[in-house]
C-alpha cells in the first residue's frame, strides 16, 4: 500500500480564470495568492456547482497539496473548501 502525505493551507482568491471545453461558460480555475506570496491556479477539486457560482474574489480558500516545487509553488494543489473562521 502506498501512502502519500498531504498538507493543507489557505490562499486568497485574486481572480477567476474562465473555463474551456467542458467548462465553457463556467469557472475554469481560481487564481490564488498563498501566504508566501506565490500566485498560482486552483482548478482541481471544484464541483460543477462551485464552477457556476465560484468563491468571490477576496475570499479565502483552503487547498491541499503534496509538497512544494523548487520554485516554492504547491505541487498537485487541489481546492478543498471556502475558509470560514469560527
Image: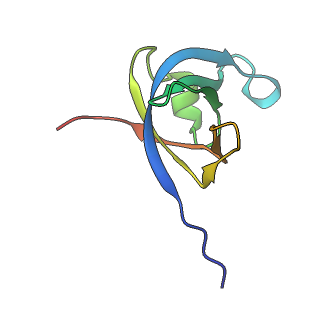
Which image quarter is the N terminus in?
Answer: bottom right
Q: Is residue 30 left or right of residue 9?
A: right
Residue 63 x/y as whole percent: 49, 42
Which image quarter is the C terminus in?
Answer: top left
Residue 3 x/y as whole percent: 60, 75
Q: Does residue 19 sit above or below 36 in this rendering?
A: above
The residue sitting at 39% across, 21% down in the picture is: 59
Q: Is residue 63 left or right of residue 69?
A: left
Foreground residue among 12 and 18: 12
Q: What is the quadrant of residue 12 in the picture?
A: top left
Residue 17 x/y as whole percent: 66, 17
The residue sitting at 34% across, 35% down in the picture is: 83
Q: Does residue 75 sit above or below 84 in this rendering?
A: below
Q: How many tags in the picture?
A: 0
The residue sitting at 51% across, 24% down in the picture is: 37
Q: Residue furthest left?
A: 86
The residue sitting at 49% across, 55% down in the picture is: 7
Q: Is residue 83 left or right of residue 73?
A: left
Q: What is the quadrant of residue 71 in the picture?
A: top right
Q: Residue furthest right?
A: 21
Q: Does residue 80 sit above or below 2 in this rendering?
A: above
Foreground residue among 27 and 15: 15
Q: Residue furthest bottom?
A: 1
Q: Residue furthest front?
A: 70
Residue 9 x/y as whole percent: 44, 43
Foreground residue among 66 and 13: 66
Amino acid at each position: 500500500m502506498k501512502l502519500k502525505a498531504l498538507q493543507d493551507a489557505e490562499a486568497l482568491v485574486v481572480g477567476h480564470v474562465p473555463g474551456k471545453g467542458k467548462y465553457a461558460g463556467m469557472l475554469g480555475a481560481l487564481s490564488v495568492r498563498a501566504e508566501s506570496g506565490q500566485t498560482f491556479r486552483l482548478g482541481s477539486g471544484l464541483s460543477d456547482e462551485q464552477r457556476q457560482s465560484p468563491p468571490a474574489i477576496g475570499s479565502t480558500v483552503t487547498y491541499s497539496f503534496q509538497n512544494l516545487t523548487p520554485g516554492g509553488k504547491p505541487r498537485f494543489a487541489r481546492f478543498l473548501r471556502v475558509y470560514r473562521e469560527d
